[in-house]
Image (spheres, rainbow, N blue to C red):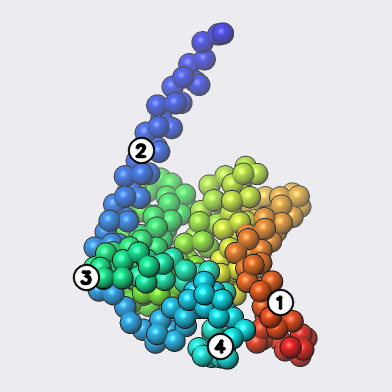
Amino acid sequence: MPYNATQNNALPTNRLKVAAQLKILMFCLLSAMILSVIDRTDVNWDLQNYHLYGPFSALTGRLGQDFFPAGFQGYLNPTIDLPYYIVKMIWFPNHPILVAALAGLPFGFMVFCVFNVARILLPSHGYVVWCGTTLLGITGATCLSEVGTTYDDILIADFILSALWLLLASRAPSYTAVAGICAGCAVGLKFTAAVFMPGLVVMAILLMPKIKHVISLLAWMTVGFMAVWGWWGALLWQHFGNPLYPMLGHLFPA
């Protein structure tokens, strides 16, 4: 087999890039965990109303037995709140510091995504500008106030920013597929994330002019959406004849 210098030299470079990314990721996650512990565990109204009840209802078969105990929010897809419920109520019910630390992980990953988007959009500016841009992106009052909480906006941002990062990083079909799945999961977990979809599609059209790429992105978005929402929509249909119950009752008489 002939010697390929380019191929041989590329391997250490790729390994160094992966190692650097892992170090940055670990720094972001650990910093976010520390910040979340400083802020302590959260007891916001949404948590007390439905962020714990939703997963409890889904896991214990209460759907169809309880009547609006958490208002209409009790019928929203509980998948997004399952990780927090499992950590807080099942795994570590008597370890609030550990719960607070783990609750900071979504913020850490969001910081990692913002940093990588900055690297792609400002490739020649170096770490000082990348870090400064990242700080501007993550230090809004609303964002910082939600670190370690169950409001879920940061968790949804993880999926949206992952999709944005992947679309910017490569035109490869595999990147488009994962980006589409991430975007679809965001909408499946929280319908309000749909406001970001037109922007992602327009960006895909600008970056990938061929219509087949855009169709592929839309198809993978659908896959991601159904992967996290499909089971819940089916349960609502089974119990109430409306996959979006209690919304759109005029279209799905329950």
- Looking at the rendered structure, the secondary structure element under dot 1 is helix
Point out the tag, 3 or 4, that comes first from the N-terminus. Answer: 3
- The x and y percentages for residue 205 are 68, 56
- The x and y percentages for residue 29 are 32, 56
- Do callouts 2 and 3 mark residues in contact (Cβ within 8 Å)? no
Amino acid type, mark 3: Ile
User: In which quadrant of the rendered image does the N terminus lie?
Assistant: top right
Which residue is label 3 attached to?
A: 38
The residues bearing labels 2 and 1 have C-alpha atoms spaced at a distance of 48 Å
Amino acid type, mark 2: Ala
Point out the tag, 3 or 1, that comes first from the N-terminus. Answer: 3
- Do callouts 3 and 4 mark residues in contact (Cβ within 8 Å)? no
The residues bearing labels 3 and 1 have C-alpha atoms spaced at a distance of 44 Å
How packed is label 3: few (under 14 Cα within 10 Å), some, or many (20 or more)? few
Which of 234/130 is in front?
Answer: 234
Corner quadrant of residue 221: bottom right
How packed is label 1: few (under 14 Cα within 10 Å), some, or many (20 or more)? few
Point out the tag, 2 or 1, that comes first from the N-terminus. Answer: 2
How packed is label 4: few (under 14 Cα within 10 Å), some, or many (20 or more)? few
Point out the tag, 2 or 4, that comes first from the N-terminus. Answer: 2
Q: Which residue is drawn at 53% across and 47% down?
A: 169
Point out the tag, 1 or 4, that comes first from the N-terminus. Answer: 4
How packed is label 2: few (under 14 Cα within 10 Å), some, or many (20 or more)? few
The residues bearing labels 2 and 4 have C-alpha atoms spaced at a distance of 50 Å
- Residue 96 in sight in this render: yes
Which residue is label 2 attached to?
A: 19
Which of 81/130 is in front?
Answer: 81
- Looking at the rendered structure, the secondary structure element under dot 3 is helix
- Do callouts 1 and 4 mark residues in contact (Cβ within 8 Å)? no
Which residue is label 1 attached to?
A: 238
Amino acid type, mark 1: Gln
